[in-house]
């Protein structure tokens, strides 16, 4: 049986992924005038939640 190795090419970059987390956290803000979100990430792309 032949093994097919197909790698996805349509995935998010690390920057897009972590920016999405920051945007989602901003949406949870109770103050509509200052909806700010943040995501702290290490140099090896590990999210510190």
Image (tube, rainbow, N blue to C red):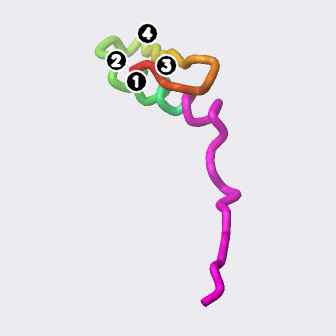
Taking 31 as reference, is 44 left or right?
A: right
Q: Earlier in the sequence, mark 1 or mark 4?
A: 1
The residue nearer to you, when weighing 35 against 38, is: 38
Which residue in the structure is indicated by mark 1? Answer: 25
Say which element carries label 3: loop
What is the residue that sits farthest to the right in this orientation?
Answer: 9
- Mark 1 vs 4: CB contact within 8 A: no
Categorize mark 3 by other alpha carbons within 10 Å: few (<14), some (14-19), many (20+): some
Question: In 3D space, how far apart are the residues under numbered discs 1 and 4 (Cα atoms)?
Answer: 12 Å
Say which element carries label 2: loop
Which residue in the structure is indicated by mark 2? Answer: 29
Q: Is residue 11 magenta?
A: yes
**Predominant secondary structure in magenta?**
loop
Looking at the image, residue 2 lies above or below residue 40: below
Looking at the image, residue 25 lies above or below residue 32: below
- The N terminus is located in which quarter? bottom right
Image coords of residue 5 (percent x, y) = 67, 71
Instruction: Tell me the residue at 33%/23% (across/down).
Output: 28
Looking at the image, residue 31 lies above or below residue 24: above
Image coords of residue 38 (percent x, y) = 48, 16
Which of the two marks, 3 or 1, is nearer to us in this view?
3
Which residue in the structure is indicated by mark 3? Answer: 39
What is the residue that sits farthest to the left in this orientation?
Answer: 30
Q: Which mark is residue 34?
A: 4
Q: Which residues are magenta?
A: 1-19
């Amino acid at each position: 049986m032949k093994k097919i190795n197909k790698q996805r090419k349509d995935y998010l970059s690390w920057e897009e992924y972590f920016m999405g987390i920051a945007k989602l956290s901003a949406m949870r803000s109770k103050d509509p005038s200052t909806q700010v979100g943040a995501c702290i990430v290490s140099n090896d792309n590990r999210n510190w939640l």
